[in-house]
Image: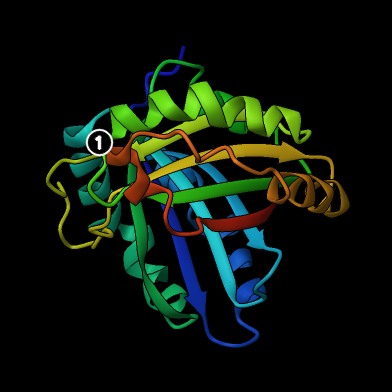
Amino acid sequence: MSDLSIFELRQYTLFGGKRETLIDLFEEQFIESQNICGMTVLGRYRDEEDPDRFVWMRGFADMEARRQALSAFYGGPVWNEHGAAANATMRDSDNVLLLRPAAGGQGLDMALSARPPLMRITIHDLASVGAADFNAFFEAVMVPLVAASGGEVVAALATAEVENSFPRLPVRGDRVFAWIAFFDGVDEERSFTQRLNVQSGWRDDIPENLFPALARKPEVLRLTAL
C-alpha cells in the first residue's frame, strides 16, 4: 500500500508555444530534485484539449512532510538556478487542488504507475456537500454508471480540508471530488463519454442534500502522460 496521503493536482496555463520548453526543463531539472527533497513526482501530462496547459501531480506522506519537502526544494539550489526560467513559461500556476484519497483503494501513486495512453480526471464541485456523503453516493451509483458506459474508476480523491502548510504556493479554496479513469486512446475516451452522457435518470432519486454537488457539470481533464 502507498504511504502517500496528500496529493497536489497542478494545472499550469502557459504562454503560447511554451509547453515543450517547460516540459524539457521539468524533465531535466525538476523530477529527481523534488524526489530527493522528500516528495514524489507522480506524473506529468499534456492537456489534450489545450496546447498551452501543462498538468502534473505530486504526493506527500502528510502535511508536515509536505511543508518540509517544499521548503527544501523551493529554498534549494535547483529551484534557485532554474525557477526563473520555469516561471517565464507560465501565465498562471495557481490552479492547484490539494487532495487526499476519498476512501480505501490502492494508492494513487500505484494507480498512476500504469502510465495509460490517456487519463481522464473528472472533478465535481462539492459545494456544501460532505465528501463522505458524496463518496458513498459515488460508489453506489456513479461507479456502476461508469462501468456500464465502458470505463473503470481507478482512483477517487477529495479536497484535503486542512490548512495549507506551505502558503507560499496557493491552492484552490473550493471543495471538490475527483475520479480518475484510464483509456487506450482519445477515440476510446470519446466513445466512453458519449455513452456516459446519454445515461438518463441517475440523479432522480438522490437525497436533496447531495444535489448541490451534481447541479453543475463537472470539470473534465483529458491528459496524455509524458
Image coordinates of residue 55 in percent, x first then y, are: 54, 59
Side of 30 where 5 appears, left or right: left
Q: Nearer the viewer, residue 122 or 61?
A: 122
Task: List the residue tagged with mark 1.
Answer: 130
Question: Hey, which quadrant is residue 23 in on the image?
Answer: bottom right
In the image as oriented, which residue stretches furthest toward the right? 187
Q: Residue placed at 27% from the left, 52% from the top?
A: 127
Q: Is residue 150 above or below residue 216?
A: above
Q: Residues within 10 Å of mark 1 (few under 14, many from 20)?
A: some
Q: Residue placed at 44% from the left, 59% from the top?
A: 216
Q: Nearer the viewer, residue 66 or 125?
A: 125
Image coordinates of residue 40 in percent, x first then y, are: 43, 36
Image coordinates of residue 99 in percent, x first then y, are: 34, 41
Question: Hey, which quadrant is residue 151 in on the image?
Answer: top right
- Label 1: element kind: loop
Please indicate, yes or no, whether residue 29 appears anywhere in the rendered image. yes
Q: Nearer the viewer, residue 25 or 4?
A: 4
Please indicate, yes or no, whether residue 6 appears anywhere in the rendered image. no
Q: How many marks?
A: 1
Q: Is residue 38 above or below residue 123?
A: above
Kind of residue at badge 1: Gly
In the image as oriented, which residue stretches furthest toward the top? 1
Side of 122 where 171 appears, left or right: left
Side of 169 where 44 appears, left or right: right
Q: Nearer the viewer, residue 77 or 226?
A: 226
Q: Residue placed at 50% from the left, 55% from the top?
A: 218
Coloured how? rainbow
Image coordinates of residue 115 in percent, x first then y, are: 70, 37
